[in-house]
Image (spheres, rainbow, N blue to C red):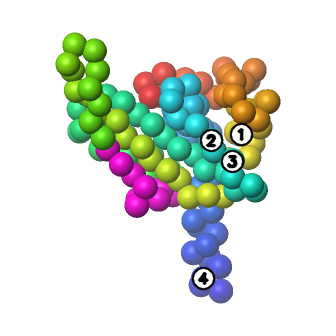
Amino acid sequence: MINFIVVQLTIVKMTPNKKNLYLIYGLLLGNSLIMKNKSDLKLIIEIECKYTTFLTEVYNKISSLVDCDNKLTVIKTKLCKGGQLNKVMFLHTYSNNHYLELYNKWYKNKSNKNIPLDIMNSFNEVSLAY
């Protein structure tokens, strides 16, 4: 009985709700994606910025909303135009089917990401920030 309760809490954390849906929509408008592998779906988040402190803040916010695979979280340095160095963070969630509705909205032809028609229902200033 105790194990069932723990599993149930984990599932609630991973399921997109209105609060974190704004954040996920903002990330999907960027370089983030939902990867489908057979029957499992995984959210892969890519964020690029100049400062590592911002990436740490974003990581803390995202990992409090969805279960992330910490072994696959990577921060790399990228050389940009003019010799500027940017940091890029790659963050993977665990594979599950909780992103199926999002996948069906964003990947109509199953290979290219498309902006869903109902984006205004799940878009706000939080989405724009990410």
Outermost residue on the top side: it is: 82
Q: Which stretch appears magenta?
A: 67-75
Residue ID for mark 4: 3
Q: Position of residue 47 (x, y in %)?
A: 41, 34
Left or right, residue 78 beside residue 13: left
**Mark 2 crowdedness (10 Å alpha carbons): few <14, some 14-19, many ≥20:** many
* Residue type marked 2: Ile
Cα gap from disc 2 to disc 3, whole angstroms? 7 Å
Q: Are marks 1 and 2 in contact (CB under 8 Å)?
A: yes
Q: How many marks?
A: 4
- Asked whether residue 64 is in view, the answer is no
- In which quarter of the view is residue 3 placed? bottom right
| Amino acid tagged 3 | Lys
Callout 1–callout 3 Cβ contact below 8 Å: yes
**Residue 44 left/right relative to 89:** right
User: From the viewer's perspective, is the residue at label 2 or at label 4 nearer?
Assistant: 2
Q: Is residue 54 above or below residue 79?
A: below
Nearer the observer, 10 or 94: 94
Residue type highlighted by circle 1: Tyr
**Camera-nearest residue between 119 and 79:** 79
The answer to whether 74 is drawn above or below residue 55 in the figure is below
Query: At 61% across and 72% down in the image, what residue appears?
Result: 7
Name the residue beneath numbered marker 2.
Answer: 34
Badge 4 crowding class, 10 Å Cα cut-off, few under 14, some 14 to 19, many 20 or more, is few
User: Is there a contact, CB below 8 Å, between mark 2 and mark 3?
Assistant: yes
Chain-order first, disc 2 or disc 4 = 4
Using the image, tell me which numbered label, if any, was put on residue 103.
1
Q: Earlier in the sequence, mark 1 or mark 3?
A: 3
The percent coordinates of residue 99 (x first, y second) are 68, 47
Q: CA distance from mark 1 to mark 4?
A: 29 Å
